[in-house]
Amino acid sequence: MSLLRPTDDSPIWVHHLWMHFIVLIWGFTGALGKLIHVDALPLVWHRIVLAAVFMALFAGVTRRRFVLPPRELLGPLALNSAIIVVHWITFYHAIKLSNVSLTLACLSTGPFFTSLLEPLFFKRRILPAEILLGGGVVAGMLLLFGSVEGQTTAILVGLSSSILSALFSVMNGRIVQRMPPLDISFWEMSIGVVLLSLYLGAQGHLFQTMTAPSGSDWIYLVGLATFCTAFAFVQSVRIMRYLSPFTVMLTIAMEPVYGILIALFLFAESEAMTAGFYLGVATILAMLMLDAYIKRRKRRKAA
């Protein structure tokens, strides 16, 4: 068994540990988004371009060839690529509209949306406990959002990002059963580059987007594209072979905790929120943890 290179033979707790490590890495993406002085759309374009390039370089160094996806997966891959691109755009746009803490709080609702979407994709019924705990999540959201004023647009954009993140995880949970994680990640990033470039070209903003970053922006973009995207993205897709989409999203729910702490450390006063805000976040996370506990007990009884 190896913690550095988990395999099919590794215990399940190793994959859980890796998922938490990936989420910790993702906790830095919000802070990096705030440090990069470009708008959300050019930021995401550079992120996916650099991520695709670094994946290609990795494949070249390791002498690995990317396999073309089966014809029946081209549609799902293109759709999921568009979803992750729009998810990242809305994520960074929400940060630009408000701050890292509020955006990550919105993202913490992802498992709630996943619990609604997963039964549709995996053809199972919605459990009564999920409905009750979903009500608890909504209560936490109301408590959280009631503690901030004048942030309606940022909240709506942040929630949109959360829904897209949930949809992306559920769809990738099915695709990963048919393709290697690195291949999925590379094709989704590459298709995303094509789609976003076509959109920017049609708007006449492609050259402006390409030249938007300057100075320190490039340092943060490289870090964002390599460690926080190329590496973390491939690993998160790989882990979906061993963990359910809901478990993955439940772990991702810890991203706001890591991200908020990182943002408070780096930006101090601009990220400080009211007590009601943090109580709302705690309520949402408590509901998600309770849901995970109930499902774990049911699985043990079934076994």
Image (cartoon, grey):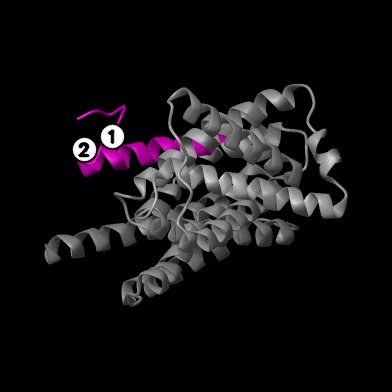
Q: Quarter of the image holding residue 268?
A: top right
Residue of label 1: 6
- Please identify the dominant SS of the magenta region: helix
Q: Is residue 275 visible?
A: no
At a point 41% along the width and 44% down the height, the residue shown is: 181
| Tags 2 and 1 touching, CB below 8 Å | yes
What is the span of residues highlighted in magenta in the rendered image? 1-28
Label 1 SS:
loop
Tell me which amino acid carries mark 1.
Answer: Pro
Locate residue 25, reporting x and y percent.
49, 34
Above or below residue 279? Residue 231 is: above
Label 2 SS:
loop
Locate residue 299, reporting x and y percent.
19, 62
Residue 33 among magenta residues: no
Q: Can you say which quadrant of the picture contains the C terminus?
A: bottom left
At a point 32% along the width and 75% down the height, the residue shown is: 124
Q: Is residue 251 visible?
A: yes
Cα–Cα span, label 2 and label 1: 6 Å
Decide: few, some or many residues near mark 1? Use Cα within 10 Å; few <14, some 14-19, many ≥20: some
Tell me which amino acid carries mark 2.
Answer: Ser
Judging depth in this view, the residue of 129 and 63 nearest the camera is 63
Q: Is residue 125 left or right of residue 33?
A: left
Residue 10's label in the rendered image is 2
Residue 277's label in the rendered image is none
Locate residue 186, reporting x and y percent.
52, 42
